[in-house]
Structures are given as structure tokens and as C-alpha cells.
Image (cartoon, grey):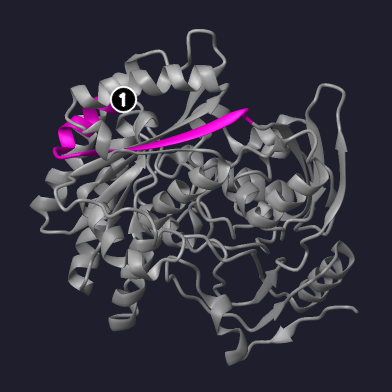
Amino acid sequence: MRQSMIPMSKVYEEYLVDESKYTGEAQSISFPESEEELLAILEEARRAGTPVTIQGGKTGITGAGVPEGGHILNVSRMNRVKDAWLCEDGTGRIVVEPGLNLMDLQKEIFARFRKEALCWPVTPTETSATVGGIAATGAQGITRLLYGDSRTYIEKLRAVDGKGRCLEPAGEEELDAFLGKEGITGVITELTLRLIPSPEEVWGILFFFGEERGALQLIEDLRASERSSADKTAAVASVEYLDGRILAMIESRKSTMGRIRELPDVGSDAEAAVYVELHGAEAGIEELAEILMESAAEHGSDPDAAWAVSGGSEVEKLHAFRHAAPETCNLFVEEAHRKDERITKLATDMMIRDGGLCEQVLRYRSDLEKEGLQGCIFGHGLEGHLHVNLLPGTWEAYQAGVRLLRVWAEAALKDCGTVCEEHGVGKLKSRIFRDCLEESYREENERLKAAYDPEGRFNRGNRFTPV
């Protein structure tokens, strides 16, 4: 049945907001179930001169899929697997539509490649995120340390641009015009994903520390050491840092979170934790785990208090605990937003390439205290990619938080870092950071729009647009 542009009503209010609580407006919405329907809707929008916002699972935290007038093109019903095959080199390929979410993708891969045990090693913590959204923001998740960027595992795609052309970009440069661009160049309608063999074994260890410095020093040790077993059959896949504030917040809400309710209690004296995940052969993992246990103990962590698990289902429980960090912060923002609708999520997605982790955390902590702001710190410790979530309870605190984010953004650029690494920029951060960004962002944005969407039809306001 041909889908059309449905006038907006209260029935569709949930499509005007994402997890950041950034809220917009629209005059119409559609849910195409095929590329043919999508093309018809875009043609209808073109004739009416209506701007289009592309939307997937609404799990974003920067407002990229939130409309600012015009039409919402929600692709969540374009969620089929179109093809899958095994390659001679032992890898696999699976062709999917953009609305397929990560959880269903994993189920499809398991069903189709059960004997070969293949996986798509892209692991954002939100499993309801769509593949198209992951591609559009460049999301990766906690195992990027070992497996690299998500674009490595996107071999081909099909897209419709602002001129109404159906494109099949080939080669890195053409793919880059759509990957990580948050919909400003067009709608992704199909993706060919590269699958690799699943690790033989997966272990997860969550170390707790009575002093934050011990946790940071463990991560610094890992940065300076060899992160694979002597025979190279196992390696560290992720190193995640969680400070005491977020541990306390998770613990306070644990009883309402079904996936982590049965985990042991986190001690009230825990000032920080480090989660390390190991992939590979069992003997190599055991070797690495022993080294980690010794190093953690040297820095003040009690090995007997660590949560150590093995096997996919058990490790998923620790993934759920890690996911509870942003989830808990989002719940805080939701409650604050109910009291004052101007309050949205304020969090960093900055990668600092120069300088040590201790200095980075101490600076964040000092700046928060100086401004009288509340916040928590967690994220990808070994990569200098921490997510500082500010927790403003009032509009005045929110405004102070925005000012502090701008200060941190300028410092990140001076330290050869990046302002927005994997969450996207969206409309929210585009407004927060528009006055403190490198000109190269703006130049790239204009070049891409000229080539693919000269009328500015798609997702206006995303990325870094000129003031």
C-alpha cells in the first residue's frame, strides 16, 4: 500500500523529540516501507516545497532526527534483510534496510550464519538504534578500541539525494559523503554490511576502586602496555571508565532496570570502576586476565570484589550495566525537562588525543566544581573519549553548562582533538558549538550540500552550519 504524508496530530507527538529531549515541530509525517514509497513521498514533498527530516529509531542524543518544521520521513518500517551470503575468505555480507535495529540485526545474523558464527562488530550500547542511524552518525560503541570505526564494516550503500537521484556510492570518498553526515546529503535506503568471525571467547571484568586515581592509573598502565596475549590470540576489546557519581546513580535506579536488577550491589565506597572486555582464544584471555587482575590490585582494586564473567549472555549483563550509565543520565534529564522544557541533555562527545586521562578527568572535575555544576564522567577511557554528562536542575545551571561545554570544545580543538566523535552533531550541538568550531567543518558542510542537496531539503540544521 502506498504511504503518503500524514498530517501531524497528537498521535505522533513522540516523533517530535529524541533522547536528548530536544523538541521540534512538523506539519506531516510518513512511514515508508520501501524505497519506491520513499521516493513517492519525497516527490510529494518536493512539489510542495517542504523540507524533510530523516528519522530512524529516535535513540539519538543530539536532535539530528528532530524536525524543525516540514515533514518527518521515518524509515523505521524499512527494516527488512534483503540478502546475505558467505564469502570465500570466511567473512560474510548482509544487505539490510536502514530501519533494522541492532537487536534484530544480531538475531538475523545468528539465524543465517549460525554454523559460521559471524558477527557485525559494531556495538553501540542502545540496541534499539537502527543500522541507518548508526551509519549516519558514525556510532561504534565500546569495542572500537579493537575493531575500529563502524564505516570499516559498511561495504556499500544505496541512497536518495536531494535532487531525487538514487545513488550507489562506491569507494571511500563517495561513501564518506553519506556515512557520518546525519542525513544532510540524503536518505540511506540500503546498506551492505561486512561480517567477521565472532571471537572464540568473550570475557568481561568490572574492577571497582575505593579511590578514583587508582582506576585512572590502571587505564594509563593499559595505554602504555601490550594489549594482546603473547601469542596474539587474544586482545583487549574495550576499556570503559565510570566515576563514582554515575555508579551511585545506577545503583539508585537499579531496581527499576530489569536487565541489571539481579547484578550484585555496588559498594557505597566505590569512587570509580573500570570495565575491561577481552576477546579471543581462551588461553590468551586467561593470560591477559591474570595480568589485569595483578595490575588492578596494585592500584587498589580488590580482585575478590571484581565482577568477572565469560560467555556472550553473561557479558551482555555487563554491557547492560554500562548502558545504564547514559540511560540513567537520560532519565535525570527527562525529569528536569518536565520541570522546565528548555532543559535538554548536555554531554560531551569530545576526544582528547593529547594529554593523560588523569589530567583530563581532573580538569573536568575542577571546572564543574568551579562553576557549581553537577555532572558525572564515563566513557572510552583508553581512547581519551570520555562522556561528561552535566546534570542541571535549573535553567540557570543549564545555561552555565552550555558555557562550560563551549570552553571545553575550544580546549579540545587546541589539543588536536575532536568536538563530536560518535554521537553526531545534530541540531542541539550545532547551536551550542556554532561559534567555536573550525572553519573546515563549515566548508565541508557547504561542499556536500552543493553536491547532493543544493536546496537544503534534508535535515536542516544538522552538523556545523554557518551562522
User: Is 282 in the magenta?
Assistant: no
Secondary structure under tag 1 reads helix
> Where residue 142 appears, x then y in whole percent?
48, 40
- Report the quarter where the C terminus lies: bottom left
Residue 171 sits in quarter: top right
> What residue sits right under mark 1 in the picture?
293
User: In this image, 462 relative to 200: left or right?
Assistant: left
Q: At label 1, which amino acid type do we have?
A: Met
Q: Can residue 226 be seen in this view?
A: yes
At a point 48% along the width and 8% down the height, the residue shown is 230
- 405 with respect to 424 (left or right): left
* Residue 184 seen by the camera: no
Quadrant in which the N terminus is drawn:
bottom right
Task: Tell which of 359 and 111 is nearer to you.
Answer: 111
Q: 192 or 342: nearer the eye?
A: 192
Against 388, residue 175 (above or below) is: above
Instruction: Specify start and end residues of the magenta stretch as a single range.
Output: 199-219
